[in-house]
Image (tube, rainbow, N blue to C red):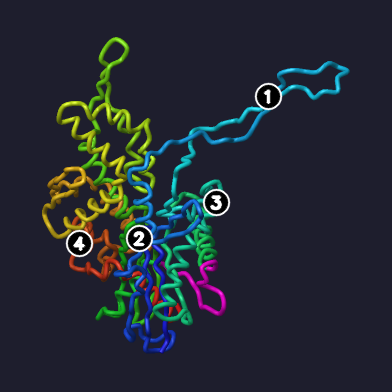
Amino acid sequence: MRQGIGIDFGTSNSLAAFHDAGATAGGPIEAGTTRFVPLEVDTPVMPTATYLDRDFQVRTGQAAIDQYIDDNTGRTVELVPEVLGESSILVGAAGANSREAPETMTQKVYGPALEDPGLPGRLFRGLKRLLGDPHTRRLMVFGQPYRLVALITPVLLRIRREIERSGTLAGPLRCGHPVRFEGRDPNRQMLALERLQEACRHAGLLGSGIDFGFFPEPVAAALSWRASAAETRGTALVFDFGGGTLDLALLRFDGDDHRILATAGAAIGGDHIDQRLFRELLFPLLGKGELWRRWGDERMIETRFPFEQYEELLLNWTVGYTLNQNRFRHPVMDCMQQPPPAGPKFRRLFDLITRNLGYQLFQEVAAAKVRLSTRESTVLDLPELDIALTVERGTFEAMIEDILERIDAVVDDILQQADLAPGQVDVVVRTGGSSLIPAVARLLERRFPGRVVDHDPFGSVAEGLSIAAARGL
């Protein structure tokens, strides 16, 4: 029996799987079974997160997120200027024949107020998006420069240890990668794979005789689907729409063999949709568009509240704690004194900031999105902020209309690359959590009527990678 190991190192979440094949390399992929590695206590799905505290102790996965929340709830942030260096100026000179040193004054040179002396730790999420960026080499962590590779290695090390607890690393191993890493640099794919391979080496996932290799994520999803599909021939379009990216692959199957015809992708995913929902649904309930009224020296001043200064930090919950500074809180506290409806909105914003509720809010937004996949409406329930908002599926779909247009364009792109008409595609395999959105399903059904099938939205890539490893692909 030949065992393969697959690692799906994702932008948002990661998984790993074993595939025990009943045949030698190159044999039928129908034979064998797959089992997922329990990366967390009660689930194989682990958040791709790293948390470093001031003692440079590392936490990964859900523990990293939990520690970040605990450390920053209610913590007031006071940024202080960064010391860039010192300068000396001559303030008095000794006589020409004097042996005394000239009198000087030394002053520190300060940069912008960017340092948070009370910061307990740094949380890193979505670093996979930066792997192809040649300009992102190091990130400063408590005054120490950390290479990007060093910040993703702990997650891969955690995966390796959990694999060893559940089995062995003796078998061949395949690590997935998107067909197109994010970024605009023409060499981003090669750079990203070099960095990811280095991190895997530091984590002990290659070397010492391990048969290690990379494998395209949508092709892996196709192998997972193919292992349970009745049809063994034809042209398949794999549509893998996950949390961070959209990955497409066109393959031609002939029995157990396959040939890749084309690949395409885009840097859009469920995380982007969650941010869109947060912006459209919650911003108006947090004070966006309201007026800021306060007394000046001689009169009442009335201006639009500068909500745009808060937006990006609200949409990126990993840095949302930085809003708990006086310069952000004081305008909100001013506006909290206004009568309804403005006052209660700013009270919500104040509670969100001071209690560091960004992660919890995004979790509920994502959950509401999932519920809309099976219901025509749902309630966005946020008791921490006294919000119970009914959201209709039609409203949600209108919010993501431009994202659907981008998806349609990526489908056009891959068909043009392969010089195929939609009618020449025999089956469309829909996978990835974001592929469950009904509007996405309708888009594919409209393009490929009667030929769209669903396949394991969360585990297909990890399973397919383990199958590829077992077959020596």
CA separation, marks 4 and 3? 42 Å
Q: Evaluate whether residue 232 shows in this view.
A: yes
Which tag, 4 or 3, sits closer to the chain's start? 3
Amino acid at circle 2: Gln
Outermost residue, top side = 298
Q: Earlier in the sequence, mark 4 or mark 1?
A: 1
Q: Are marks 1 and 3 in contact (CB under 8 Å)?
A: no
Q: Position of residue 202 (x, y in %)?
A: 54, 66
As helix, strand or loop, the secondary structure at mark 3 comes to loop
Q: Earlier in the sequence, mark 1 or mark 3?
A: 1
Residue bearing the label numbered 1: 105
Gap in angstroms between the C-alphas marked 1 and 2: 51 Å
Q: Secondary structure at mark 2?
A: helix
In the image, is 330 to the left or to the right of 170?
left
Residue carrying label 4: 445
Q: Which residue is mark 2?
A: 62
Q: Amino acid at mark 3?
A: Arg
Q: Position of residue 391 (x, y in %)?
A: 14, 48
Which amino acid type corresponds to the residue marked 4 in the rendered image? Glu
Of callouts 2 and 4, which one flags the residue occurring earlier in the amino acid sequence? 2
Residue 396: x and y in percent read: 19, 48
Q: Which residues are magenta?
A: 201-216
Specify whether residue 467 is in view. Answer: no
Label placed on residue 137: 3
Tag 4's secondary structure?
Answer: helix
Which quarter of the image is occupied by the N terminus?
A: bottom left
Question: In this rendering, which labeled residue sits more in front, label 4 or label 3?
Answer: 3
Q: CA distance from mark 2 to mark 3?
A: 26 Å
User: Circle 3: is it few (<14), some (14-19), or many (20+) Cα within 10 Å?
Assistant: few
Name the amino acid type tagged 1: Met
